[in-house]
């Protein structure tokens, strides 16, 4: 049985970019709790309305709510998944193992990066509203300004929480919560670390060699 992958890393450390590649080249499915929550906000569902202000401030939403959303959107039967943005704390790690993955194998991948490099990455991040492709206005511009290379869509948007004042809070929350999560996987012998400052190709090959 192949391993699922659990991507752990600060906002902007490149988890989404790698996930996109693993989906297209290795047949993984990508589940991002942040994307699921943003979809609820876009739909203006009851849940979306409930979480909007928490997300816009850069805080974490409740464990209970996120696990319900995650459970409703995965089917582990015949797919290998990338978990992106979940778990964010040790309680979520334990829930993922005990209630979601159960006997399935999984490896956690830590995207290690100097936090001071992330503010610029995040303020320049743009996402295609139609297909989710990720761009950076400095390091990975779309070939035609304002137009998605992948799907031709013209809605390259900035996430509500990629504004400078919120980014600082998100990075702080990350730094305050990540160590116990890393220790959890380390103690179980299920943690690998990648240098997230390397090129996307190098990171992709490094992770691929472990699964
Ligand atoms: P992300 O797209 O992973 O950066 O997540 C964006 C925001 O969604 C976070 O700042 C949180 O408010 C919320 N969020 C996403 N995943 C989780 C999670 N596993 N637990 C709690 N909140 C989450």
Image (cartoon, grey):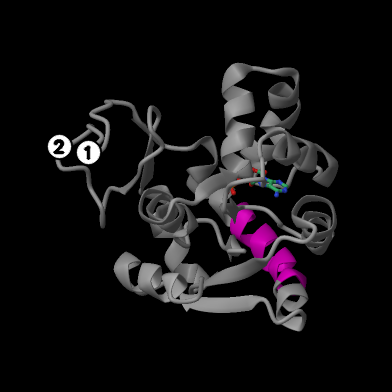
Q: Picture quarter containing residue 185?
A: bottom right
Residue 121 position (above or below residue 207):
above
Instruction: Say which residue label 1 marks.
Output: 149
Pair 2/1: label in front: 1
- Is residue 173 visible in the rendered image? The answer is yes
**Main secondary structure along the magenta-highlighted residues:** helix
Front residue of this view, candidates 71 and 193: 71
Question: Quick one: SS at disc 1?
Answer: loop
Q: Is residue 207 left or right of residue 167?
A: left
Residue positioned 60% across, 18% down in the render: 43
Q: Residues within 10 Å of mark 1 (few under 14, many from 20)?
A: some
Front residue of this view, candidates 141 and 110: 110
The earlier-in-sequence mark between 2 and 1 is 2
Q: Picture quarter containing residue 156?
A: top left
Q: Residue 21: percent from the left, percent from the top?
A: 38, 54
Q: Residue 154: percent from the left, percent from the top?
A: 27, 26
Q: Is residue 100 left or right of residue 148?
A: right
Q: Any magenta on residue 35?
A: no
Question: Quick one: SS at disc 2?
Answer: loop
Residue positioned 36% across, 54% down in the render: 25
Front residue of this view, candidates 197 and 86: 86
Q: Quadrant of the N terminus?
A: bottom right
Instruction: Say which residue label 2 marks.
Output: 144
Residue 99 position (above or below residue 75):
below
Residue positioned 53% across, 47% down in the render: 30
Q: Is residue 72 left or right of residue 203?
A: right
Residue positioned 69% across, 58% down in the render: 173
Q: Residue 89: percent from the left, percent from the top?
A: 77, 60
What span is colored magenta in the figure?
Answer: 169-181
């Amino acid at each position: 049985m192949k391993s699922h992958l659990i991507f752990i890393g600060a906002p902007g450390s490149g988890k989404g970019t790698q996930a996109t590649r693993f989906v297209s080249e290795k047949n993984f499915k990508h589940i991002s709790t942040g994307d699921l929550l943003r979809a609820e906000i876009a739909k203006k569902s009851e849940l979306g309305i409930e979480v909007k202000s928490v997300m816009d401030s850069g805080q974490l939403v409740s464990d209970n709510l996120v696990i319900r959303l995650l459970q409703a959107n995965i089917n582990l039967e015949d797919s290998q998944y990338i978990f992106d943005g979940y778990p964010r704390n040790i309680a979520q790690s334990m829930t993922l193992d005990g209630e979601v993955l159960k006997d399935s194998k999984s490896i956690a991948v830590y995207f290690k990066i100097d936090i001071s490099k992330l503010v610029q990455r995040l303020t320049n991040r743009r996402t295609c509203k139609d297909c989710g492709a990720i761009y950076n206005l400095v390091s990975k511009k779309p070939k035609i300004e304002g137009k998605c290379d992948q799907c031709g869509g013209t809605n390259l948007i900035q996430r509500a929480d990629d504004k400078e004042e919120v980014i600082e809070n998100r990075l702080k929350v990350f730094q305050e919560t990540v160590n116990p999560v890393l220790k959890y996987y380390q103690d179980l012998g299920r943690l690998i670390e990648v240098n997230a400052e390397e090129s996307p190709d190098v990171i992709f090959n490094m992770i691929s060699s472990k699964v």
